[in-house]
Amino acid sequence: MFTLFLLTHILTGFVCLISGIIAMAARKKRGTHTLSGEIYHGAYVLVFITSVVMSIIHWEESAYLFYIGTFSYALALLGYLSAKFKWKNWLGSHIGGMLGSYIGIVTATIVVNISKIPVLNELPVLIFWFLPTIMGTPFIIRIGRKYKTSKKRVSI
């Protein structure tokens, strides 16, 4: 049973990584951006569920999966719902939530796999916990400013 959860986790995590890149690269309008965003969110739901289940099964080794999975999915859900309901200042929540959740899934992917990469596995793992956030946060700020200062209405 654990193997099924692990395979689902890996597959849906891969789908998140790819669909997230597609959504980021696509023009911000209905079509590719929204379709890849729906795929991203759907896959993220499964990543979240499998990370919680696997962390509970192997709590001693994988408790961090529970926390990073919960926090990252909360960001994905914030970004997803803000676009669906378009509440006041929804675009900032959408951008921050979706990009923040992408940083979360990249962080988890790196931290889980870094021990298998020669040379990099000799560096302190703490570096890889913070590197995606250090690199991704300026990107979130830049994109947020781009759409905040834009006079053009963005229909996502």
Image: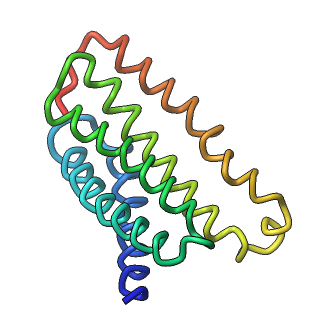
Which of the pair 30/133 is nearer the observer? 133
Based on the displayed image, in which of its 4 quarters is residue 30 positioned? top left
Query: Which percent across, then down, holds residue 141?
Result: 50, 24
**Residue for point 48% across, 60% down:** 66
Quadrant where the image shows the N terminus:
bottom left
In this rendering, position of residue 80 left or right of residue 136 = left
Quadrant where the image shows the C terminus:
top left
Query: Which percent across, then down, holds residue 77?
Result: 29, 44
Which of the pair 34/86 is nearer the observer? 86
**Residue for point 42% across, 23% down:** 144
Q: Is residue 146 above or below residue 33?
A: above
**Residue for point 20% across, 45% down:** 34
Query: Which percent across, then down, holds residue 152?
Result: 23, 15
Based on the displayed image, in which of its 4 quarters is residue 61 positioned? bottom right
Numbered-mark total: 0
Q: Is residue 93 above or below residue 37?
A: above
**Residue for point 75% across, 59% down:** 125
Query: Which percent across, then down, holds residue 132?
Result: 61, 46
